[in-house]
Image (cartoon, grey):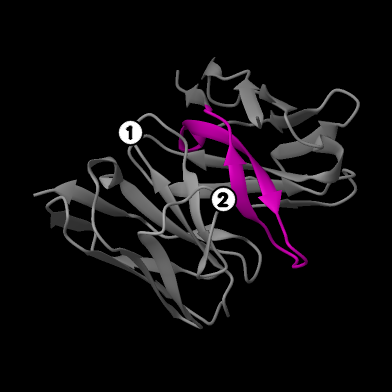
Amino acid sequence: EIVLTQSPATLSLSPGERATLSCRASQSVSSYLAWYQQKPGQPPRLLIRDASNRATGIPARFSGSGSGTDFTLTISSLEPEDFAVYFCQQRSSWPPTFGGGTEVEIK
Amino acid sequence: EVQLLESGGGLVHPGGSLRLSCAASGFTFSSSAMNWVRQAPGKGLEWVSDVTAGGGNTHYADSVKGRFTISRDNSKNTLYLQMNSLGADDTAVYYCARGKRDGYNLPYFDYWGQGTLVIVSS
């Protein structure tokens, strides 16, 4: 199965700063990569599908890029509600797999 | 508004069985692939199982293959997960999620329920 490695595990930033999260795949997943946000006690929320397409209702400060094995989720200017855990997920081959997550915490 | 409401979780002894349900509303359930994804306490996400819109094709994670069975009743807009031979490693919150394929073979997950907690313990 395809292994997704997210880095860093924790990102300590202040509101207004730029967040850059990485997801690396053990083999090419083309552009079949999604990003999710999860807050404590809540289910994940889809942010980005197919590497760079924002899901419905997702603010423009969230953007995704990359293809093949290296992907990035960028939050251009952190809002207080953006502090959460972020997961990537590939849908290139069975089984769908998730990365281990990056926690964006308030510095 | 899309709603997915899971039920059926609880405490079960090792080796026991449990059946989860997910009641869907706010979208055309019978046209949507559906999935179960789980999350062990304090851990990441693990995809468990997928069923196509008509129920004719299913996929399972190796960790549950032969023990779990996904099914659906499109007349009731409900998804199920029958879980047998449960072990401690199956302890998790189980989420029901709609799987979108957008013309490809595998899904991403655009809507999620709130989850139901399964605890396997003696």
Residue named by callout 2: A56
Alpha-carbon neighbours of circle 2 within 10 Å: few (<14), some, or many (≥20)?
A: few
The image shows residue B87 at horizontal and vertical percentages of 52, 33
Is residue A78 at all visible to an observer of this figure? Answer: yes
Q: Quadrant of the C terminus of chain B?
A: top left
Query: Residue at coordinates 82% horizontally, 33% vertically from top-left?
Result: B72
Q: Quadrant of the N terminus of chain B?
A: top right
Is residue B65 at all visible to an observer of this figure? Answer: no
- Name the amino acid, label 2: Thr
The image shows residue A19 at horizontal and vertical percentages of 24, 62
**B34 horizontally vs B39: left or right:** right
From this viewpoint, which residue is outermost toward the left?
A: A107
Is A31 rendered above or below residue B69? below
All told, the count of numbered labels is 2
Is A29 rendered above or below residue B10? below
Whole-angstrom CA distance, mark 2 to mark 1, is 22 Å
Query: Residue at coordinates 63% horizontally, 71% vertically from top-left?
Result: A92
Residue named by callout 1: A40
Whether residue B107 is in magenta: the answer is yes
Is B29 rendered above or below residue B114? below
What is the span of residues highlighted in magenta in the rendered image? B87-115
Mark 2 or 1, nearer chain start: 1
State which chain disc 2 sits on. A
Query: Residue at coordinates 40% horizontally, 48% vertically from top-left?
Result: A37
**A75 horizontally vs A38: left or right:** left
**A101 horizontally vs A36: left or right:** left
Front residue (pair B66, A106): A106
Q: Secondary structure at mark 1?
A: loop
State which chain disc 1 sits on. A
* Picture quadrant where residue B71 is located: top right
The image shows residue B67 at horizontal and vertical percentages of 69, 39
